[in-house]
Structures are given as structure tokens and as C-alpha cells.
């Protein structure tokens, strides 16, 4: 009841400005006892120079601190910002902040503050499943699909059932699904480095079966979800020299419907087979818009990484050894396709100008080679990983004001991290330097914002925030250098409510969260789904330029808009659409956050 009162008071405060016009933003989930705890307050007028932390049960003041003025940046209508540092408060409990007469939303200080997040984010992953969907308890898209550009006659049937719907639409991409699968497997190995798959390990729980139904099956739910992706990826590689990369296109965008009620006609009747695009490494597009594809190495590298990670997870289980060997063989074969066709296979559009415009591929091949070396110990893979590492170096979106849509995907080069402990000291310094160069450029960008958000506010900026925080934590894991821990925490806390709008960026997470996401299943069923990472704020100019985007006026968050805008509105697909791959990447981030706490890493 107390939490509800806080939320109601907060919402009223957001809708109608408090007389003192002070707003407080903190991480709504909470903080670890030993970690940095830095909230923010802002106003149009000068702010008090002190603040208090108050226990929610007794309303006793447990901490008083000095507010630290931020003088080098501002946001929108608000010229006055202060940081509220209460890192010295280490006692577990439930609290709220008070600045003047304004109270923050409640939060916890707890050692396991992030332990439940990976499981909660998996709820959204299951909601995105294609084939059997446990959220809807229905089967969708049973006729996927009919091939295009492949070695066989166009229209030939290929079993491409399964996988995940990419976002609010019902397309399926190897480009994003391969990355999501690999990152979930890496999250498992980071948190559970031992050799055997167990039903309850660390923060991973067994609450559902392989179909996502609420019945335990003796396997961590994270691995059930990763395997759902692996099984679909194996279908896209039906022969050693073949790889398919996309199911459906923007013909999907014809109106709202539940996935089991498909009506789109791709040439084989309404609700019939959907097109499955072959990865030939060339520009593709069945209507006026063509991709700028130049090869297949981006897809191949991530595919190889996922399959080699699968071998590392399941190889020691005699019952799963055939599956592990099948994955490893597929990973080797697809890696060779990438070596033969260096370059990128981009996403395909049909009548819309928007597509995944990835241009980098050496980072993916580095990751694939590093994981294949870990699985096989064949020196050629180690040599390949080192070659690709120096080829890509520090190239990324980091420090840039603008990029193409998903141009530098997957936003973090996990190959550098997975290669690091396989090479000599000199090469280690090189890899760490690549990570550090990117982080430093983001630190400089962050100085422009009172929130120290170190990313450009382009489409899917939340994915960049996740990647940046992850890279900071992996850099520390690699080197032991904790200099970026505070910066990483500020990025993490941006996602969990320490932002101008006071929203967490995950559906169903925290106290104030996106309740009107651009997601057909939510809109049509009236049921909320927990754990989906929404795209996040974009520059106002981007919002105004996108086709078909809008909001319901008046904007209840108008006072908080600034250089970037965010809308909790189903009509805004640019800021409030949850994505499958962003959510999977966030699982890795929060596994790392929990890992640092449970190993008593210095903050």
C-alpha cells in the first residue's frame, strides 16, 4: 500500500508541477550496499543544498547529505541539477529521498537488487516467440516459409518455423536473433562458469519448460530460451553452403492483429507462407528499396559464436552431446561462409525505407573465431580471432553524433572480451585499449548531459546505453581497472529511472514504467508483459522526421522533454517499442551487475 501511495503521488507530481517544481530521479529498483548510489534532482529554480534519505517503514531520517551542483550541462526547461550521493549509506532496507518537500519513489538497498531481473526479462522473450507462443497459448505462422534469392527455385518451401518476433512487428531476423542467442549463452557462462547444466544455478531459475509453459523441466529458463533461438538458427542452415537470414518483410505492417491471426499475403494467400531470404551477400529487395549488402560475415560470425557457445554449455552432458556436436559443426560451416564472403548482409525492406543497416563485420568474425577456439582449441581459430580483432580495432558508434540504423551492430564487440584471456600480455593491452578508447569517447559525450548519458540519442538509444554499461563492466572484468564503474552505474540507473522522465525503460519493472508500449499483443489483449526494453529517447529532430510516428496529445511528459524526447505512447514506435535483441542484451548486463555484487568487486 505504501508503494502505491508513492506511485500515485509521483504520477500527480509529473502531471501537474509541484509548487516548488523540484523533481527527484533515482534508480527505482535499488542499489547494492557497497555500491555507488547517486540520484539526481532538478528544477527551474535554485535547489536546496542538502537532501535526506528516509526509511519507508519508520520515516526516520537515516542519512543527510550535501547536494552537489551540476554546472556544466542542463536539460530542456531545467537549468538547475544536483547530484545526490548517498553511497555512504550501506544498511539494507527500503528508503526514499527527500529534497525540500519533494520525495522520490521508494527504492531498496539490497545485495540481490538485480538478481530477479534476468528472469523477469525472459518473460518478454517468451512473449516474442514465434511458432508456439506461451503468452498467447497459441501457434502462429505455421507456414514459414518460402525462399527468395536462394539456390533453389523461388517459392520453394523451407521450414523456418520458430524463433522470435523481432519487436512489435512479426518479422524474424538472423541478424538480431543470432546476437540475442549468443548473448544469453554468454550470460549463462559468465554467471555459471562450471561444466554442467543445472536446474537452479546462481540467479538462474527453472520455472518454465522448453515451451515456456509454467512447469519446471530441470533446465534453467535462460537456457530454454537460448535453445529456442538455436533450434531456429539451425533451420536457417539446411546445408553446409546455405544460410538464410530473414523471414517476412515490411508487408507485415498492415495493421494490428495477433500473430496467430495472420492475414498478410506474401504471394501464397492470406496467412500463408512468408518469404524467407537467402544470405547471398548481395543487395536484396523485392520492391523499390534495396539493401547495401556486401557479404555475409556479420551474420556468420555471430552465428558461429552462438553455436560454439552452445557446445561449451551442453558438451559435458552425455544426453546433450549430439546436440552440442551438431551446433559446433554448424558453427564451423557458417564461419567458413563468412570467411568466403567478407562483408555484411543487411536487413531487407519492401515498400518502406527502414531496414537494419549494419556495416561492420570483423567484430562478429572475431567473436565467432574466439568461441570456436574455446570449443576446439584449433590454432587457426585463434589466429583468425586476432586478425579480425586488429582489423576492427575500436570501430563503433561510440563518440559519434549520428549513425545509420543498427550500423554498428551489435553495439558492443564481445569478441575483444572473449579473446582477452586467450592471448599474451601485449595483445591483452591492445584489446583493453580498444575498449578504453570507446568508453573514453562516451565519457566525453556524457559531459554534455547532467545525467552523464554517454550515447547519441538515435533510434534504439537504450540498446546503446546497455552496450556502454556492459563494455565498462567487461573492461573492469578484463583488467581489474575500476575507473569506469561509476560511469557504468550512471548508464544502468538511466535505464532504471534516473532520467528526465522518471520512467524505467522496461515494461513492468520498477514503480513507473512504460504502460502503453508499441506492442500489438499488449494493445489487443489488454495484458501487460513484463521485461521488454523499449527503444528509448531519440533526438527531437529524429522523432519529427520518422514516417507514421505520433503521440496522443497533449503530451503528459512535455515538461521533461529536452534534446531528446520519450513518450509512453503506443503510437510512438521510435521510443516506446520493446525489442527482443535489446532485452536479451540487457539480460547480459544485469547478470554482470549481479556477478560484480556476489563476488564483492570493489566499486
Image (spheres, rainbow, N blue to C red):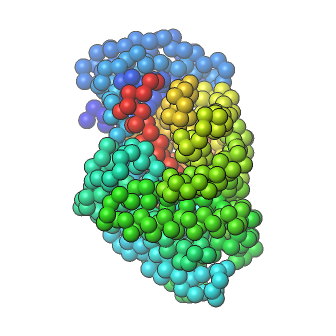
Q: Closest to the observer: 258 or 182?
A: 182
Work out whether 529 lies above or below 260: above
Left or right placement of residue 164 versus residue 212 in this view: right
Residue at x 35% of width, y 65% of height: 320
Q: Can residue 483 be seen at all in this image of the molecule?
A: yes
In this view, the residue in front, 558 or 563, is: 563
Q: Image height check: is 207 above or below 419?
A: below
As rendered, which of 517 and 477 lies closer to the eye? 477
Q: Quadrant of the N terminus?
A: top left
- Asked if residue 252 shows in the view, the reply is no
Q: Quadrant of residue 398?
A: top right
Residue 381 horizontal/vertical position (percent): 60, 55
At 55% from the left edge and 62% from the top edge, which residue is drawn?
303
* Residue drawn at point x = 53 percent, y = 26 percent: 482
Q: Position of residue 201 (x, y in %)?
A: 30, 47
Which x, y percent locates residue 575? 57, 49
Image label count: 0
Position of 413 with respect to 114 (left or right) is right
The foreground one among 332 and 256 is 332
Q: Residue at x 50, y 39 (%)?
A: 495
Q: Measured along the vertical axis of the image, is residue 351 above or below residue 569?
A: below
Is residue 482 placed above or below 166 in the rendered structure? above
Q: Is residue 57 left or right of residue 391?
A: left
Q: Position of residue 166 (x, y in %)?
A: 52, 62
Amino acid at each position: 500500500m505504501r508503494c502505491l501511495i508513492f506511485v500515485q503521488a509521483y504520477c500527480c507530481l509529473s502531471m501537474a508541477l509541484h509548487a516548488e517544481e523540484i523533481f527527484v530521479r533515482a534508480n527505482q529498483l535499488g542499489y547494492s550496499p557497497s555500491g555507488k548510489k547517486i540520484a539526481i534532482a532538478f528544477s527551474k529554480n535554485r535547489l536546496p543544498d542538502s537532501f535526506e534519505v528516509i526509511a519507508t517503514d519508520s520515516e526516520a531520517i537515516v542519512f543527510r547529505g550535501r547536494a552537489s551542483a551540476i554546472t556544466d550541462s542542463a536539460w530542456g526547461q531545467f537549468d538547475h541539477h544536483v547530484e545526490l550521493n548517498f553511497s555512504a549509506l550501506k544498511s539494507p532496507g527500503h528508503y526514499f529521498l527527500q529534497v525540500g518537500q519533494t520525495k522520490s519513489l521508494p527504492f531498496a538497498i539490497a545485495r540481490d537488487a538485480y538478481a530477479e531481473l534476468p528472469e523477469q526479462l525472459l518473460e518478454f522473450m517468451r512473449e516474442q516467440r514465434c511458432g508456439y507462443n506461451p503468452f498467447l497459448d497459441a501457434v502462429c505462422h505455421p507456414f514459414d516459409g518460402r525462399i527468395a534469392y536462394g539456390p533453389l527455385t523461388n517459392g520453394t518451401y523451407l521450414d523456418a518455423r520458430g524463433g522470435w518476433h523481432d519487436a512489435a512487428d512479426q518479422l524474424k531476423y538472423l541478424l538480431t536473433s543470432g546476437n540475442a542467442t549468443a548473448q544469453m549463452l554468454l550470460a549463462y557462462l559468465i554467471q555459471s562458469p562450471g561444466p554442467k547444466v543445472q536446474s537452479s544455478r546462481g540467479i538462474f531459475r527453472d520455472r518454465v519448460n522448453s515451451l515456456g509453459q509454467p512447469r519446471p523441466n530441470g533446465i534453467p529458463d535462460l537456457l530454454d530460451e537460448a535453445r529456442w533461438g538455436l533450434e531456429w538458427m539451425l533451420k536457417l542452415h539446411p546445408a553446409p553452403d546455405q544460410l538464410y537470414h530473414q523471414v517476412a518483410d515490411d508487408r507485415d505492417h498492415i495493421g494490428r492483429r495477433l500473430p496467430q491471426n495472420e492475414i498478410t499475403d506474401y504471394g501464397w494467400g492470406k496467412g500463408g507462407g512468408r518469404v524467407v531470404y537467402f544470405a547471398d551477400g548481395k543487395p536484396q529487395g523485392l520492391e523499390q528499396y534495396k539493401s547495401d549488402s556486401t557479404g555475409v560475415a556479420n551474420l556468420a560470425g555471430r552465428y558461429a559464436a552462438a553455436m560454439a557457445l552452445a557446445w561449451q554449455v551442453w558438451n559435458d552432458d552425455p544426453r546433450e552431446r549430439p546436440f552440442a556436436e551438431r551446433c559446433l559443426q554448424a558453427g564451423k560451416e557458417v564461419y567458413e561462409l563468412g570467411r568466403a564472403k567478407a562483408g555484411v548482409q543487411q536487413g531487407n525492406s519492401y515498400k518502406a525505407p527502414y531496414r537494419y543497416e549494419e556495416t561492420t563485420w570483423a567484430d562478429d568474425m572475431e567473436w565467432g573465431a574466439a568461441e570456436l577456439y574455446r570449443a576446439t582449441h584449433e590454432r587457426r581459430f585463434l589466429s583468425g580471432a586476432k586478425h579480425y580483432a586488429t582489423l576492427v580495432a575500436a570501430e563503433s558508434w561510440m563518440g559519434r553524433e549520428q549513425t545509420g540504423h543498427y550500423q554498428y551492430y551489435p553495439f558492443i564487440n564481445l569478441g575483444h572480451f572473449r579473446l582477452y584471456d586467450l592471448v599474451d600480455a601485449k595483445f591483452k593491452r591492445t584489446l583493453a585499449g580498444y575498449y578504453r578508447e570507446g568508453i573514453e569517447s562516451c565519457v566525453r559525450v556524457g559531459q554534455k548531459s547532467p545525467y552523464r548519458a554517454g550515447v547519441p540519442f538515435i533510434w534504439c538509444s537504450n540498446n546503446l546505453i546497455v552496450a556502454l554499461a556492459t563494455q565498462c563492466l567487461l573492461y573492469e572484468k578484463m583488467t581489474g581497472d575500476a575507473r569506469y564503474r561509476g560511469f557504468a552505474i550512471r548508464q544502468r540507473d538511466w535505464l532504471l529511472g534516473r532520467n528526465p522522465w522518471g520512467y524505467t525503460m522496461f515494461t513492468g519493472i520498477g514503480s513507473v514504467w512504460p504502460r502503453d508500449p508499441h506492442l500489438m499483443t499488449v494493445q489487443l489483449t489488454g495484458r501487460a508483459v513484463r521485461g521488454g526494453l523499449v527503444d528509448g529517447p531519440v533526438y527531437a529532430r529524429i522523432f519529427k522526421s520518422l514516417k507514421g510516428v505520433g503521440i496522443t496529445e497533449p503530451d503528459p511528459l512535455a515538461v521533461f522533454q529536452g534534446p531528446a524526447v520519450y513518450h509512453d505512447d503506443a503510437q510512438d514506435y521510435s521510443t516506446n517499442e520493446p525489442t527482443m535483441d535489446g532485452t536479451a542484451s540487457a539480460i547480459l548486463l544485469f547478470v554482470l551487475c549481479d556477478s560484480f555484487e556476489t563476488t564483492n568487486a570493489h566499486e
